[in-house]
Amino acid sequence: MLSNLMSWQITLPIALAAAIIGYLFGSIPFGLILTRAAGLGDVRSIGSGNIGATNVLRTGNRTLAAATLLLDALKASAAAWVVSYFLGEEAAIIAGFFAFIGHLFPVWIGFKGGKGVATYIGTLLGVAPIMVVLFAAVWLAVAFTTRYSSLSALVAMLVIPVALWILGNEKVAAVMAIMTLISYWKHKANISRLMGGTESKIGAKG
């Protein structure tokens, strides 16, 4: 397995091209674009201040939140699909990773983006689509049991790299593991609230 992990065949110019394409796709701030287009102002001025679907939901517009979730996922998938078609599968993995990075640190809005769950899922859809089913199953199971959305995502992101590794997809597993660690860092406030018992539950008001 270790030999497979180390056997990347991609050249540096192709890797750089994939990274740039992925980052540009990922850095499109759909949450901000959609809320402004709907006349709801700057989503960064409410709630957590980030541009992801959870914060868009705090505007009270569920349709916009769902659209943000979908578009934030598909921008990573699209980056992976486009790059895979022109530059190959290894380049697609790199593009998906940098789409995730672009969402977290978008150049257009001062490198202050979302927490990456939707773009994480979108990357999976682009490079290992069957894993989206596992992610959803784990998320639903944890959410049903605990009613914590953040915990559901955190557990699902922990399971995915392990499952990929067990299935022999070491390259994607390694990249998704790095993405999991980064997303955990972005979720540090949620983790602190979970540990303190103050994290909001699904369906909770106020």
Image: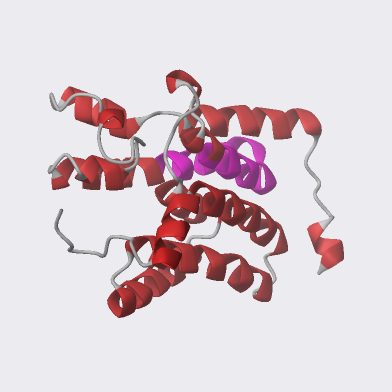
Q: In the rendering, at what x and y percent does residue 170 appear?
A: 71, 63
- Residue at the image point whose x is 37% and y is 75% from the top: 142
Say if residue 84 shows up in the picture: no
Q: Nearer the viewer, residue 106 or 99?
A: 106
Say if residue 123 shows up in the picture: yes
- Name of the residue lying farthest toward the right: 3
Locate residue 33 relative to residue 6 in the image: left or right. Answer: left
- Residue at the image point whose x is 26% and y is 65% from the top: 201
Judged by its main secondary structure, the magenta piece is helix
Locate residue 155 relative to residue 60 in the image: left or right. Answer: right
Q: Nearer the viewer, residue 201 or 101?
A: 201
Locate residue 189 relative to residue 167 in the image: left or right. Answer: left
- Residue at the image point whose x is 62% and y is 47% from the top: 93
| 32 versus 83 height, above or below | above
| 190 versus 75 height, above or below | below
Q: In the rendering, at what x and y percent does residue 160 appear?
A: 55, 67
Locate residue 65 relative to residue 168 in the image: left or right. Answer: left
Q: Which stretch appears magenta?
A: 74-100
Residue 92 sits inside the magenta stretch: yes
Q: In the rendering, at what x and y percent does residue 155 appear?
A: 48, 69
- Name of the residue lying farthest toward the front: 196
- Residue at the image point whose x is 38% and y is 68% from the top: 136
Report the quarter where the N terminus lies. Answer: bottom right
Q: In the rendering, at what x and y percent does residue 143 appear?
A: 32, 72
Q: Nearer the viewer, residue 191 or 103?
A: 191
| 21 versus 133 height, above or below | above
Residue 144 sits inside the magenta stretch: no
